[in-house]
Image (spheres, rainbow, N blue to C red):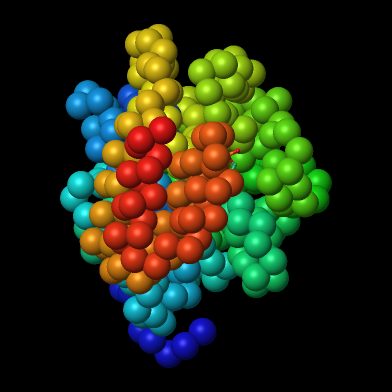
């Protein structure tokens, strides 16, 4: 640990403040319980703003999860890390997700984030399978170490007064999500999201919703089910299987920022909104490009937009050729010309 002074909230030995459950702000969060999953490199401010813009007016209070942010990066005041903590009013309310493995550092990062005032919830990552993270004992590696996870979450609980949540997997190699969830609950988390795969599975194989159901039955705090939800039918099925309080949508929202509104509307009203037309897709791609350039500049924006463009055009006639064109695009104008071409199809 460096000699940077820890935040006073972390240094204090105050006991965990036991909360009256349910907290009113958490109840409010679960009024709109279809969430965009945190996805590093995807759900940045641009994407979160876009998803929110596409929500019906009644749904605007939906909570948005950030990409994961390193607690150590916050501790060392790494500029890129601190930039990821900034949220804009158009995307809020936001849950900032942090990852780490040292209780004091994680608690300090949480206190720092709370003090910035840009987040409504502090979420903790216990699911990232990436080797770089796993080797450091962070992300999904914590599934192997529930005692340490409980210490981290207790330290965060003591350091902040905002609601806190944790996003877990089913386990590392073996399934132990019920034990981990109970430890998280004991540490004072306000809700738990469960991705129905082990670390060993990364993103392959079908998500195991039955195991998410076991977690839901084992804890009192609200549970969000996650894994393989992509349409109305899979939403119905995951809810029926898990009895979860909410559902989180990851990959199916890539290039598909309308999906959250369509699934939330279906959940709340039963109405099945039509998927967007090609003209609507082209219009949103244009907005996405403008926003990403606004937030990140043209060079980075155009580069990052290539991946989004590939997702937006998946399944379109001539999609492979379009993706080649997007990969060659160097400027915003190049991009806009290709989008124009999509619109003319
Ligand atoms: C590109 C990508 C980046 C991800 N980044 C994060 C992350 O930063 N934090 C996190 O908790 N989960 C992350 N995940 C996992 C997703 O939040 C989600 O749990 C997973 O994709 C399963 O849901 P799905 O089947 O709906 O995609 C990421 C997934 C993908 C595909």
Q: Position of residue 288 (x, y in %)?
A: 32, 49
In the image, taking residue 291 as reference, residue 236 lies left or right, namely right
Q: Position of residue 143 (x, y in %)?
A: 68, 53
Residue depicted at x 62% and y 32%: 228
Q: Position of residue 177 (x, y in %)?
A: 68, 41
Residue depicted at x 62% and y 67%: 133
Q: Residue furthest top?
A: 270
Q: Position of residue 195 (x, y in %)?
A: 61, 40
Residue depicted at x 30% and y 68%: 298
- Observer-nearest residue: 270 or 6? 270
- Observer-nearest residue: 252 or 115? 252
Q: Is residue 122 visible?
A: no
| Quadrant, the C terminus | top left
In the image, taking residue 253 as reference, residue 140 lies left or right, namely right
- Observer-nearest residue: 296 or 18? 296
Q: Residue furthest right?
A: 174
Residue 203 lies, with reference to residue 7, above or below; the image says above
- Observer-nearest residue: 238 or 299? 299
Residue 83 lies, with reference to residue 35, above or below; the image says below
The quarter of the displayed image where residue 283 is located: top left
The quarter of the displayed image where residue 109 is located: bottom left
Residue depicted at x 81% and y 46%: 174
Q: Is residue 274 visible?
A: yes
Q: Residue furthest bottom?
A: 3
């Amino acid at each position: 640990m460096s000699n940077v002074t820890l935040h006073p909230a972390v240094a204090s030995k105050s006991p965990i403040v036991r909360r009256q459950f349910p907290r009113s702000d958490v109840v409010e969060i679960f009024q709109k319980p279809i969430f965009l999953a945190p996805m590093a490199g995807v759900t940045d401010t641009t994407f979160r703003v876009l998803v929110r813009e596409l929500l019906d007016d009644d749904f605007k209070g939906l909570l948005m999860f950030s990409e994961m942010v390193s607690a150590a990066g916050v501790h060392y005041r790494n500029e890129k890390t601190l930039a990821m903590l900034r949220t804009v009013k158009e995307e809020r309310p936001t849950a900032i997700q942090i990852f780490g493995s040292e209780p004091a550092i994680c608690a300090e990062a949480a206190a720092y984030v709370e003090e910035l005032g840009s987040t409504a919830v502090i979420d903790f990552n216990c699911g990232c399978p990436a080797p770089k993270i796993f080797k450091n004992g962070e992300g999904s590696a914590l599934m192997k170490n529930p005692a340490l996870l409980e210490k981290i979450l207790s330290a965060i609980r003591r350091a902040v007064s905002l609601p806190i949540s944790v996003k877990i997997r089913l386990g590392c190699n073996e399934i132990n999500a019920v034990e981990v969830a109970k430890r998280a609950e004991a540490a004072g988390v306000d809700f738990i999201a469960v991705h129905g795969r082990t670390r060993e599975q990364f993103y392959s194989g079908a998500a195991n919703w039955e195991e998410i159901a076991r977690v839901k039955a084992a804890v009192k705090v609200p549970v969000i089910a996650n894994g393989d939800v992509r349409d109305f039918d899979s939403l119905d099925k995951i809810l029926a299987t898990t009895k979860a309080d909410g559902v989180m949508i990851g990959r199916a929202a890539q290039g598909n920022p309308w999906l959250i509104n369509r699934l939330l509307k279906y959940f709340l009203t039963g109405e099945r909104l039509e998927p967007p037309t090609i003209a609507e897709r082209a219009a949103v791609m244009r907005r996405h490009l403008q926003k990403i350039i606004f937030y990140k500049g043209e060079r980075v924006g155009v580069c990052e937009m290539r991946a989004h463009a590939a997702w937006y055009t998946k399944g379109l006639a001539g999609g492979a050729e379009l993706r080649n064109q997007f990969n060659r695009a160097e400027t915003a104008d190049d991009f806009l010309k290709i989008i124009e071409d999509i619109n003319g199809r």
